[in-house]
Structures are given as C-alpha cells and as structure tokens.
Image (cartoon, coloured by chain):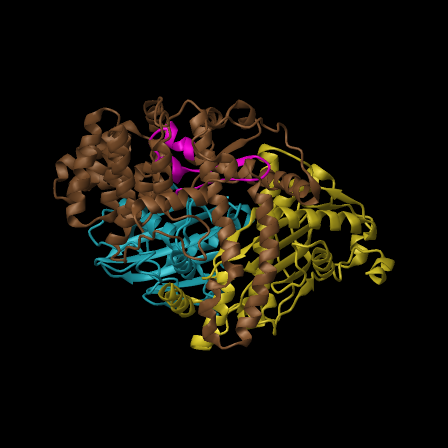
Amino acid sequence: MAIHRRSVIFVAVVLAAWSPSASAGWKLISAKETAQVDGLKVTPERDWNQGGRPGKQGRVWTQDGVGLNAIEFFSAIPAGGSLYKERDKKNNPMPKFDSGLLLPELADFFERSFRAANQLSDFTIVESAPTDIGGNKGLLVRYRYTMPNDELTRLGEARLAVVDGKLFVANYYAPQLHYFGAGLPEAQAMMQRVRF
Amino acid sequence: MMNKWLAAAILAVSFLVMAPMAHGQEKGAVREGFSAETLSGKKILLFRPSVWVGEQSTGGLAEPNADWTAQAREFLNAELARRQIEFSNELIIEPDLVGEDAKLFSEHRALFNSVASSVVNYQFFAGNRLPTRKNKAFDWTLGEGTKAIAERTGAQYGLFVRTEDQYGSFGRKMFQVLAIGLVGAGVSSGKHVGYAGLVDLHTGNLVWLNADEQMGGDVRTEEGMQKRVGQLLEDFPGFKPVATAAK
Amino acid sequence: MTKRAIVAAVVMLAAPSSLAAREPFERPTYAGAYEPLGVDERGLWMQMDDYERAFRDSPLVVRDEALTKYVKSVLCKTVGPDRCEATRVYIVQDKLFNASMAPNGMMQVHTGLLARVHSEAELATVLGHEFAHFELRHSLNGFKEQRKGSDLMAWIGLAGAAAAPNTGLGFAQTPIAFGFFGFKRAQESEADALSASYIKASAYPLRASAVWTRLMEEEDALKEERKLRKIRRRNPGAIDTHPTDLQRVAYFAEQEAEAGAAEGDDGREAYGAETARVLPTLFDSLVKGNEFAAADYVIQSRANALGWDGLLLHARGELYRLRGNPRDLVTARQFYEQAIATGSAPAEAWRGAGLTAMRGGDSSAGKAALREYLVRLPQASDAAAMKMLLEN
C-alpha cells in the first residue's frame, strides 16, 4: 500500500499523455522506393507501414507494430519546438529545442525528450558519438531503457543533426530480444542514406 | 469538488482514445503448416502466467492492485492445474531459477506479451491492420532466443498465458456517466485482456494464438477465472478430443 | 474550525482505541513467521511470492547491496529485529516519493523517497507506516472490502446511468462511497498511528511532520512554476484514499510534542554519509525529468539539512543546464565550479563546466574543462563526441 498519492486530476492528465495513438490510417511504404517524409528522403529495403505523428514534425514507421520495432523521422524542428508532441503543457511539458546546443548536448536533449514522452524512470545512454547523417555532421546516440510496468529491456539508436538551426532526427527502437538486432542493419542503412 | 470533476471530465474526454471496438476483431490464428498432429508427442513448457489486475482511475490510468493480482494468479494456477488432464501432451512447469537464467524466462514472457499485443492491435483488429499484414499469412516470432529455453527444459513448445484486467474504479464509473451526460461521448470503463499462445521453441515462431481484449469472466472470482481460462484455451490444438466435450 | 479542533479531530480519527496516545507504547508481541489464515490470505501470501520472483529480476530494481542493506537496517531499528526478519527490501528506480509493502513481506522503497528524506528517523516514519499496513493486514482487508465495494459501485454506476446524468455529481456524497473511501483513509491513518508508535518504542526520535511539510512545499513550488492553482485542503475529499498532507502534519506534530517523543539520535549524519555515495542513483530521474521546481526544491532541502557536496552541487548544475535558459547556463556553470572546488565532484562536473563555459563564449576555459573530463573518465559514453568538439 502506498504512502502518498497525487491528486486525481494529475493522474487523469498524465494518462492523457500516455494514451497510445491508436488512430488507424497506416500507409504502405514500398520497398526500394524513395519516400518523402516531410523534409527527408528515405529509401527502405523492405516494405514499411507509416503511421501517425509522434511529434509535430515527426513520422513513425513500423514493421510489426511500434511495440516491436519503430523508426521515427523528425524534420526541421525549429528552435523552441519540441521533439515529441506536447499533449499536456501544464503537467508534462516537453523539453524545447535550443539551436545553440553543442553537439554532445543533443544527447541530453534527446534523453530528456524520450524520458518525458514515455514517462521513463529507467533510461541509459550507452554511447554517443559523432556520425554522418545525410551528409551532415551529427550525433549518434545508442541507448537502453524499459517501459513502466514492462520487464522487457529495449534498445534504441538515434541520429541527430542540426542544419541551419533546425533539428533533424532519425530514431530506431525495439526490444533487445530478437527485434532490435533483426531490424538494425536496415534501420542503419536507411538512416545513413537519408537525404535532406 | 464539482470543478475538479468537471475539469477531469473535460480534460480526459478531449484526450481519450477510444478502445478498439469489438466488431471487426479476429480472435485467433494458427500458423500455416501447424496442426494438432504436429504437436502430438511433443513436450509443452507452461510458462508462469502473467497476471495483472488493477483499477482504472478516473482518467483511465491503470493502477495495479497487488491483492487482486495475487488472488487472480492463484485462481489461474489452480484452474490450469485442474485442466492439465485435458492436455494430450506432457506438460512441464517453468523451473524456478535465479539470476541470468530467470531473466531468460521472464524476458521471453514479456516479449510474448508484446508480440501478442502487436498481433491483436495490428493484425486481428481490422480497423488498424498494418498494410504489410493485409492478406498475409499468420507469421509472428519471438526470435531464436527461445532455443536456449528448449535446451534448458527439453520442451519443444512453450505455452504462454497472460491476463490483464482493469476494473473501472468508482471515479471512472462516475466519469463514464458524466461523459455520456455532458458531452455524449462513450468512454469505456474497464479492460479485460487475455492472450494464450503456443510458441515453437526451436524457431521462436508463434504457431497458435488466442487473444482478445474484451474477455469475459471476473478473474477476481474462482468461477470467473474458470470462464476466462475456458475462453483462453478455446480451440487449443493440444487437447484430448474428449476434453472439448467436457467443457 | 480552529487549529486545535482540527488536531483533536484528526487524532480521534487517526488513533484506534487500542493504540491511543499517552500510555507508553509497547510493541505487541510479534506473531512470528507468517501463518496464513483462510483461503484469501493463503492465496495472497503464496502468489505474492510469484510476483516477487518476477519482480526481483526487473531492470527497475537498483542493484546496490550496501544501500539495500542500509535501508533494511533502518527498518530493523524501527520495528525491531523480529519483525524485520520477515521482510525483503528492494530499492526501485522511480522519482516519486513512495514506498509499498506487499502482504508477503516484500518492501519496495523508491529512490524518490530516499532523495527526499534527510535522516534515519525520517526514513523510519515512512518505512514504519508501510510496515504497519503489513502488520495490520490491511492488504487482505482491503481486498475483501474492495471486492465488496466494487460490486456496489457497479450497481450505483448503473443506477446513475439510468437516471438523469447530472446526478452523477452526487455520487461521491452517497453513504456507500463515503464508507468505501473512508475505509481506506482510516487504514492510512491507522498506519500513521502505528508508525508513530513504532518510532516511540525505537531509539529514533519522531521526525514525521517535517517530511510532510516539505512535500507540501515541493508541491507548491511546482504548482507555482506551472502557474497552477494551489489548493491546500484541510479535509480529504470524499474520494481521497489518503488523509491530506495538512492532516498528517497536524497529527504528527501533536505526537512529536509529547514528552520524550522527539529525543534521541535521528541518524542524520549516518543517513547523509550512506546516501552521499549513491546520490546520482537517487537524483538522476528527478534531475532529468521535467519537474524543474520540484527537483530544485528537493536538492536545496537536502543541502539545507545535510550540506552541499560535490555530487549534489553537480546535480543542481545539471538541472539548470538541462533547462537551458540563458541565465540557467550561467548559474549552472557556477554550480559545476563549486562542485569541483569541493574536491568530491564526479568527473561529469568537468563535462558540465566545459559545456556551459563554451555556451557562454568562454571557449578556452570550456575546452580545458572538457579535456579534464576525458582525463578523469576516458571511457565516458560520449568521449568520441567530446573529442570532436575539442578538435573544432
């Protein structure tokens, strides 16, 4: 039995931010064809399904459902914008992108955004290193996390770059068992070949 | 008091995503090439069931209830034990392990839950079916990590059972009424998910799944759990032919 | 109602007659190893073991043997060795102020709780509260009551749906609803009362009201930052499951005022020393979360009680740098530099100092600090990215 409880309203609001976007409207992304995802051109090896918007400037793709594998593409987030949608400004505000961030600080921004959007207590950056994303200097972030009430260890790999003061992100994540490794080569190939 | 509830109602209605509707929902599937014959004579490992019972708060947030969960777990174990004689295969129980070995089992149990949930949400539920899964064979996997479990236990198949139940709290029920009255929106109170799945541990492939997010039976009672298990194991290919009639 | 009247009312509500204040409290003889009675209880006990078996491998459990042992030792001093033997303590990574105890003796203590208390005596009141639920078997009673209650609720729900919708607003006022939630509140108050009694029978002084006062202040700080209305209720609403914080402060303040209750070593220094080692574990999810004002309050209140050290100053630097307003970067840089000056700063303090210096246009000082960071932590997860920053 717990010692303390926050008010009902707070709980109601947090839930709202958690609700998975169950909106249908999946769109087939055909293999080997270049798809225009907002400001990015992406060429997948296999067929993918394009879903809703995790953020104002973002799109999510999945093969087996977002709980098993997902890749998100965010294009041109302006200074002051958030990576993930701010569903509840008062109770779960999202970190705001600052175009003055130094390269290694993009990892800090990504971590805080991902933690807030998914309400995580367990998140660790395994590695952050310079990388190339669509011919731009960027940061590669490898991370590990668990979702609340789930014992599955999940891994992720994100690439972030700031171009003309705007943030571009590609982010792949999946359960560590089987799925992450199975999808990684294609995810990496897509992220490396992405064009602005 | 009034203001608080009104605020909660308005906030939650504006954000809530309705649960998928019951229609247009498939409930079970078998992998191509798999049948009761394939299963005959093979050992089945029964994974420790995942049981979660809680309350749905006013906003729909799930709050675990340890006591209900414990109670439901006991009913479920008792019911599975009672029905063991109906299986035509040898059934072995998940060994009690610690450390890395225990993790191998608990992580695969969690992965099964994620895979089954994906099947339900992105294949069975026609309104949300992924284009890449349209008119395709039933093809889902836990990956070859299950081989280690087969080696450890000598079982070729693994049977997973999961139930997750959220009973509408007082506030949720009140809110449900409020929502209809004030904004005419239907809001669900409660959630009753059940998955039962059989995995070929040599390949990791899911060969049989029975899954529904609107199950019957109150798992907090013995009779309710019997009904739930009956629904979960409906069409299970590994039952003795006579057993089905006994149900 | 006058303050005294509130206190009196709360005490009457809170203290069951068998535990009434005044007479010296003797811990009742402990029943010893658990003997489950009846079907419900036996089931709870056995099946919680199943849950615990799954839980102990969870990635959320903090695997720090020394810390876990220490927290358990505080529990043992609070409730006595015989009682404490029946429990297993797990530290859980979670930023909220929370702890819980399952009916089989599994206690979960959240890192957010350890970050927010400042002495063994303060920790003892919370652990004692959770243990009291266990000893009073509230879980089991709760199960029965809730099972009963939920049927009634379903019925009321139906009746309400059939009637005019607006009657919904009156539900909380029905006697059944009062009974149900009041029952839970009474359990909480009972546990508070028994917790206070454990402490009085232990070597610790009672230090509970300060914990609840700080929680209220923290909540206020966060509400002010978010421009939310501050509501400080004297009485719980009909559907609240816990007494209000104000009630708890009043109740404990009364108990603490009793002769002898506040005497004894509160174990503040020992607590500070034991937790200092694991500060990043306790504060990380607070610092990296998005409740700036709450996190800043928690950091400052720990400093007020236990003093600043390198790790705590570093945590505050991180908090400000991550919020990242221009003035925050200046403030953050000062905290990192103060952290470094203590001689007990983690290597990451040089990272923070370097980044904030560079952001502030002080490139040479920034690069020097980042170089120092890499010397101190050559295996840093972001070493490659830092090297690139240094080369440009």
Q: Quadrant of residue C57?
A: top right
Please tell me the colour of chain B: yellow
Q: Looking at the image, which is closer to me, C160 or B123?
A: C160
Magenta-drawn stretch contains C70: no
Q: Looking at the image, which is closer to me, C176 or C17?
A: C17
Residue farthest toward the right in the current orientation of the protein: B242
Q: Quadrant of the C terminus of chain A?
A: bottom left
C78 displayed left or right of C350: right
Q: Looking at the image, which is closer to me, C296 or B149?
A: C296
Tell me which chain appears cyan.
Answer: A
Q: Looking at the image, which is closer to me, A100 or C88?
A: C88
Tell me which chain appears brown.
Answer: C
The vertical placement of C262 against B206, above or below, is above
> How many numbered markers are drawn?
0
Q: Quadrant of residue B236?
A: bottom right
**Residue B38, image x and y in percent?**
79, 55
The magenta segment is C97-125
* Residue A24 in view of the camera: no
* Residue C331 in view of the camera: yes
Magenta-drawn stretch contains C120: yes
**Residue C376, image x and y in percent?**
28, 27
Q: Residue at x 51, y 36 (%)?
A: C132
**Residue C318, image x and y in percent?**
26, 40
Q: Residue at x 23, y 59 (%)?
A: A80
C277 displayed left or right of C82: left
**Residue B155, image x and y in percent?**
74, 43
